[in-house]
Image: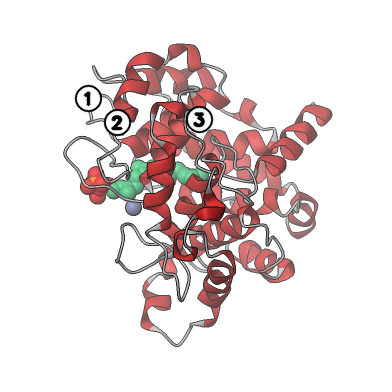
């Protein structure tokens, strides 16, 4: 980074520091608020929410703040016989939740427990994911009903690579599809011709990184487009003319990190913007200062601060959005068993 955001923190007033303990308590409280309407309104996000909350706790240095056994019991209760995971027990299987489930199991080093719960569990999950690849275009659907999106290629590559099962799919065909989604500005959309969006950039560049095909990215042009996402207030937007939002700290910065251009934004200003989105009393982060906090923005704000090397946070992997140590351990295990 040109200007290290971690420098000079000691001299800042307390409310502009990360309130770690408050965030830990906020995340711990999410599962105990079952008497609140919001808990039930967000049931469709449960497995995603668990991945966000648990990963944030790991990055905050409190990996044991949620009970490991309870997490695994819930995750396995979302697993269908066919190998996909739903958001919560009884919900249909979907790629988004399957990816979160694999990330949680990997982070908790629990693939043995998965195999004990379901024989050949990894392979069944891999085969379910592979069944969603479109043989004509190489892209992936999110579920059996067929909505296709570059996000799902990334979910597939991320999950399969953590389990050492990328060979179950046609990687080259998916890579060619991603390459057909690039726009004149160097950025990517959901499908060929679709508008560039930094969330989609993250998924496309992430999938290309896992496939070892970053050579296909116009890194100068994409880096310029991504760096233009920073606004005067320090926050990042998702595409031109839009407002800033904490979650773009992740979608934009992780993409910049993958092409080695994280120093193309002002890290110090972005750090201040993210810290300003904290609820300093009850914990959690919101999309922008003063809004209601939620676990999604809490996670991506903290992950963003980790990319900015905020002091005391564990290092996050810019591709997998999981603690870097966890990703290293998983990929080393995959290499060892190959
Ligand atoms: C493993 C971290 C991880 C992710 C899995 C689901 C997924 C892969 C990636 C999602 C990428 C994406 C599309 C993110 C954008 C989310 C978002 C804030 C969308 C909002 O879009 P608009 O159009 O908002 O409502 P703007 O800001 O453009 O007005
Ligand atoms: Zn957001």
Estimate the spatial distance between the alpha carbons at disc 1 and disc 3, rounded to whole Å: 34 Å
Q: Is mark 1 within 8 Å of ligand 1?
A: no
The residue to which callout 3 is attached is 1
Please, is residue 98 above or below residue 155 in the view?
below
The residue to which callout 1 is attached is 193
Judged from the image, the secondary structure of the residue bearing numbered disc 2 is: loop
Judged from the image, the secondary structure of the residue bearing numbered disc 3 is: loop
The residue to which callout 2 is attached is 189
Estimate the spatial distance between the alpha carbons at disc 1 and disc 2, rounded to whole Å: 7 Å
Foreground disc of the pair 1, 3: 3
The mark that comes first in sequence, 3 or 2, is 3
Q: Residue furthest front?
A: 11
CB-based contact (under 8 Å), mark 1 and mark 2: yes
Identify the residue at horizontal 69%, vertical 60% (top origin): 63
Please, is residue 230 above or below residue 300 in the view?
above
Judged from the image, the secondary structure of the residue bearing numbered disc 1 is: loop
Query: In the shown orientation, is residue 36 left or right of residue 317?
Result: left
The mark that comes first in sequence, 1 or 3, is 3
User: Where ligand 1 lies, by quadrant?
Assistant: top left
Q: Nearer the viewer, residue 26 or 98?
A: 26
Total residue callouts: 3
């Amino acid at each position: 980074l040109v200007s290290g955001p971690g420098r000079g923190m000691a001299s800042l007033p307390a409310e502009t520091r990360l309130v770690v303990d408050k965030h830990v308590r906020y995340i711990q409280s999410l599962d105990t608020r079952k008497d609140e309407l919001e808990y039930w309104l967000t049931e469709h996000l449960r497995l995603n929410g668990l991945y966000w909350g648990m990963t944030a706790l790991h990055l905050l240095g409190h990996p044991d703040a949620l009970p490991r056994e309870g997490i695994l019991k819930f995750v396995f209760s979302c697993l269908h016989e066919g190998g996909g995971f739903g958001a919560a027990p009884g919900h249909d299987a979907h790629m988004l939740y399957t990816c979160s489930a694999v990330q949680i199991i990997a982070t908790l080093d629990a693939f043995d427990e998965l195999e004990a719960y379901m024989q050949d569990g990894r392979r069944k999950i891999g085969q379910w994911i592979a069944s969603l690849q479109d043989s004509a275009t190489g892209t992936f659907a999110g579920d059996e009903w067929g909505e296709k999106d570059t996000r799902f290629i990334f979910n597939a590559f991320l999950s399969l690579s953590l389990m050492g099962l990328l060979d179950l799919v046609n990687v080259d065909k998916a890579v060619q599809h991603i390459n057909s989604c690039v726009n004149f500005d160097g950025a990517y959309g959901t499908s060929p011709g679709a508008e560039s969006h930094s969330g989609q950039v993250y998924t496309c560049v992430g999938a290309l990184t896992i496939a070892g095909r970053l050579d296909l990215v116009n890194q100068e042009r994409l880096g310029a487009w991504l760096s233009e996402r920073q606004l005067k207030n320090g926050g990042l937007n998702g595409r031109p003319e839009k407002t800033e939002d904490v979650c773009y700290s992740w979608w934009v910065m992780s993409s910049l990190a993958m092409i080695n251009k994280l120093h193309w934004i002002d890290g110090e200003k972005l750090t201040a913007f993210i810290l300003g989105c904290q609820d300093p009393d009850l914990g959690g982060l919101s999309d922008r200062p003063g809004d209601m906090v939620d676990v999604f923005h809490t996670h991506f704000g903290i992950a963003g601060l980790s990319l900015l090397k905020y002091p005391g946070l564990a290092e996050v992997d810019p591709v997998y959005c999981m603690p870097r140590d966890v990703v290293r351990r998983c990929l080393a295990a995959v290499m060892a068993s190959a």
